[in-house]
Amino acid sequence: MSAGEGVDSGPATGTGELLDSLGPRFEGLEPRPTTDHPATRCRAEFIRPLLKTLRDEYGYLMLMDVTAVDWDEESPRFTVFYHLLNPKTAQYARVSVDCLDDDEPEVPSVVSLFAAAEWHERETYDMFGIRFTDHPDLRRILMWDGYPYFPLRKEFPLAGIETELPDSEVGEATEAKVLPAPMMGGPFVAQSGQPMSASEPRGRDESWTEHHHRPEDFDALEGPEQPETLEDRSGDKPRIED
Amino acid sequence: MKQNGTELGYNSKVEGDVVVTKADAVINWVRSHSVWPMPMGLACCAIELMGASASRFDIARFGMEVMRFSPRQSDCMIVAGTVTYKMAPAVRRIYDQMAEPKWVVAMGACASTGGMYRSYATMQGVDHVVPVDVYISGCPPRPEALLDGMMRLQEKIRTEHSSRELLGGREEQMKLRA
């Protein structure tokens, strides 16, 4: 079903219609490829007027989520996403804003429009390091103040990076530190396209543990020295046809 | 107490009003039967901890029903749940505020080893910041497992050199602790 189909929602709500009526008012508004809800890309300077228009004129009263995507090598590297809901028509809309600066990403805050944005933006800042200008209280929300990294950036390993505990007194007394977690062959990922019995989350290679570390040059190793991987093993098993 | 015609245990006719025992045995007996837990509930294990203290499992049978939310009034911290790095200093500070003698039970996989959370945010076992006496496996452990762990803690308390720790000098205390 295409977005907006069969729903009487006053002004236009479908992807095309929404863009048709908004396009002339906001320069640089372009559609994003989408499989579910109307989605549009917006320039950073227009995000506040655009969300205000969507809220006041199109009935998108609820801000459901603010998050971001790190595109890794690409530029622009960071894109901030806003998910809006029209509670009368149960229609969602997605708005994205590219951060122009890849090193110090920055987007205007929308807290003045949606109070709900305050914690969402703090979380996005905490995880991606995207600064929301004019945010009333832009602090970390999940990690502690003074944590030096942004954990959801692509270059940050899941296991973490060694650093100090949030409380230096406790850190000194216990000699405890924030240490990379032992991955034990993880990260543990579900194998798709297999019968359920074989698709449970598991390490891709379970041959190293806390005691048998992954060799530094593992990727360079070849031949019989390299432990067999899960994919190799699953080939030997008789496949269950489902 | 009469059992099959044989008298067992304390006989007031023979021994009068005097009971002969060791100071350690008395102190440990008292301590092990009035462990006041401090529920450090951090995740779903805390729900099982609540279950253990309710009527079905009834932790009161072991004299442990007095859950105190003030570290000053408790002597066994039950760390029930995931210890994040952000929370770890708070756990340590609460432990520091507890009066001696004190014990720590790591309840469940997360408190013992980090459990399934092998990530940047989770401390891989609360024993990095506090000395743990008993580890309880499970995710979360059943209330029976918690009770079993607490009974093992009682057994451990009964083997301690309490009188020497109480009456001995500071140096000896540190030696015993090490």
Image (cartoon, coloured by chain):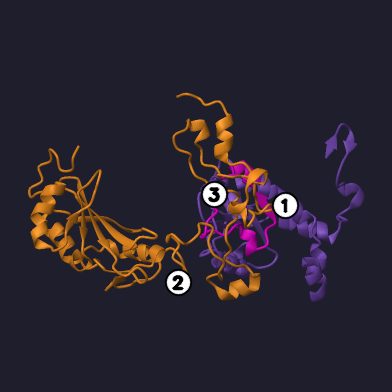
Chain colours: A orange, B purple
Q: Chain of mark 2?
A: A
Q: CA distance from mark 3 to mark 1?
A: 21 Å
Count the marks: how many?
3
Q: Nearer the viewer, mark 2 or mark 1?
A: 2
Per the model, the C-alpha gap separating discs 2 and 1 is 40 Å
Identify the element where label 1 is drawn. helix
User: Residue A159 at what x, y percent from top left?
Assistant: 54, 58
A106 above or below A241?
Answer: below
Is residue B137 covered in magenta? yes
Callouts 2 and 1 on one subunit: no
- Left or right: residue A13 versus residue B73 is left
Farthest residue to the front: give it: A223
The residue that appears at 79% across and 67% down in the rendered structure is B165
**Image coordinates for residue B89, horizontal then vertical, percent:** 56, 68
Q: Position of residue A51 (x, y in %)?
A: 18, 61
| Residue located beneath label 1 in the image | B154
The answer to whether the residues at label 2 and label 1 have Cβ atoms under 8 Å apart is no
The amino acid beneath tag 2 is Asp
Looking at the rendering, which quadrant does residue A138 occupy? bottom left
Residue type at mark 3: give it. Cys
**Number of other residues with Cα within 10 Å of mark 3, as a class: few under 14, some 14 to 19, many 20 or more:** many
Query: Start and end of the magenta stretch?
Result: B118-147
- Could you tell me the amino acid type at mark 1? Gln
In the rendered structure, which disc, 3 or 1, sits on the residue that comes first in sequence? Answer: 3
Few, some or many residues within 10 Å of mark 2 (<14, 14–19, 20+): few
Residue hosting label 3: B45
- Observer able to see residue A130: yes
